[in-house]
Amino acid sequence: MIVHIVLFNFKEDNRELNIKKVSEMLEALPDKIPTLQSMEVGINYSDAERAMDLSLISTFDNRSGLEQYAIHPEHVKVVEYIKSVVTESKVVDYEKIVN
């Protein structure tokens, strides 16, 4: 199983609205992208200096599934919007051994 984690910080302009919109856009993807096995989206409540605004944790059966997700037109639309409203993002992809 492949785990794909992305963390986002948003621009101040319309910040709360954009966080909510991105969350909703991401949460709609599992019904549209067959290789996307699961997705969890979390809106941060911590005011810690190192905190990020939004997290995404998604899983795929294999690397090919993640690669197909990355180029899927529905995902690409979401990414285009995200790029317009965030100041930074961080990603971690790893293989989780499932027994």
Image: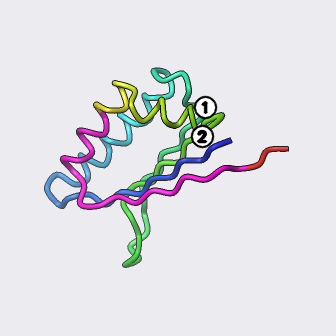
Location of residue 22 with respect to 49 vertically, above or below: above
Asked whether, in this view, residue 20 is left or right of residue 97, the answer is: left
Q: Which residue is mark 2?
A: 59
Identified at 46% across, 32% down, the residue is: 69
Identified at 40% across, 26% down, the residue is: 72
Residue 42 lies, in percent from the top left, at 47, 51
| Nearer to us in this view, 20 or 78 | 78
Location of residue 89 with respect to 76 vertically, above or below: below
Magenta stretch in the rendered image: 78-96
Residue 48 in magenta? Answer: no
Q: Which one is earlier in the sequence, the residue at label 1 or at label 2?
A: 1
Asked whether, in this view, residue 35 is left or right of residue 56, the answer is: right
Name the mark on residue 37.
1
Asked whether, in this view, residue 7 is left or right of residue 35, the answer is: left
Q: Secondary structure at mark 2?
A: strand
- Label 1 environment density (alpha carbons within 10 Å; few <14, some 14–19, many ≥20): some
